[in-house]
Image (spheres, grey):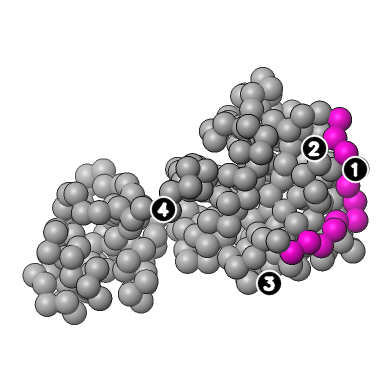
Amino acid sequence: MQKIQARYYTQGRIRKVRLLVIHSMEAPEKPTTAENVARWFATSSPRTSAHVCVDNNSTVRCVDDDDTAWCAPNANADGLHVELTGYARQSRSDWLDTFSRATLANAAKVVAAWAKKYNIPVVKLTAAQVAAGKKGICAHVDVTRAFPGTGSHTDPGQSFPWDVFIPMVKEELNGKPAKPATWSRTLVYTKGKTLMQGADVMEWQARMDALGYDIDVDGLYGPSSAETTRKFQGKAGVLKTGAVDKTTWKAAQKK
Ligand SMILES: [Zn+2]
């Protein structure tokens, strides 16, 4: 892993690691952002740092795990901090676009390695659990809420896809490659009904995305997903129903 030592940090630790804290950099989705933010920590930053910065194609070490980064008041002494390229204001589909999925995968590797090294359970803590001294994974905003008056940061934002990220960390930890979801039910959008959601929906959307269709990979099968499916079915010579039946699913795997 590339290393660019941050300027501001504290050598050593006064407490044991218990929190793995997720941040968004508030910097644009570019393949050089991890390096750029790391350089900023090394030179011109205000007095701040993080252990690791990630973007879609790189992971940059800024502060050693055994040292204390200056990243979130009240979670510095017992925290490890990873900065993800992106913004707290991002929507769920922003967090699940091609760039961010690669960023999440890189962050999941970092967090999984920490969980193993420090025996931290792979669970998303609430602010109350952070305040109660539990071990686990949390957002910067959970630290802010757990210790009122110590900061205002709300990253990585309300739409950060914890339901996607935590399983990615578990998969890393178990050493199993992410297994693509297979077809098990027909995905269909019905107006006025609760949207279907799940790993199979995300898998379908990611497949359409990979085939060049403009689709939000958000794990929710809504009207725009159905419309994309209809377009795909038209091109694939499958009946244009807008529903992903087994025939449609199979047709997309062949492409
Ligand atoms: Zn933060």
Q: CA distance from mark 2 to mark 3?
A: 26 Å
Q: Residues within 10 Å of mark 4 (few under 14, many from 20)?
A: few
Q: Secondary structure at mark 4?
A: loop
* Amino acid marked by disc 1: Thr
Q: Residues within 10 Å of mark 1 (few under 14, many from 20)?
A: some
Q: Is 184 inside the magenta-drawn segment?
A: no
**Residue at position x 33%, y 75% in the image:** 211
* Amino acid marked by disc 3: Thr
Q: Is residue 17 above or below residue 1?
A: above
Residue pointed to by mark 3: 32
| Residue 244 image position (x, y, % from top left) | 18, 59
| Residue 129 image position (x, y, % from top left) | 61, 24
- Please tell me which residue lies in front, 62 or 236: 62
Span of residues in magenta: 2-14
Residue pointed to by mark 2: 76
Residue pointed to by mark 1: 10
Mark 1 and mark 4 in contact (Cβ < 8 Å)? no
Q: CA distance from mark 1 to mark 2?
A: 10 Å
* Amino acid marked by disc 4: Ala
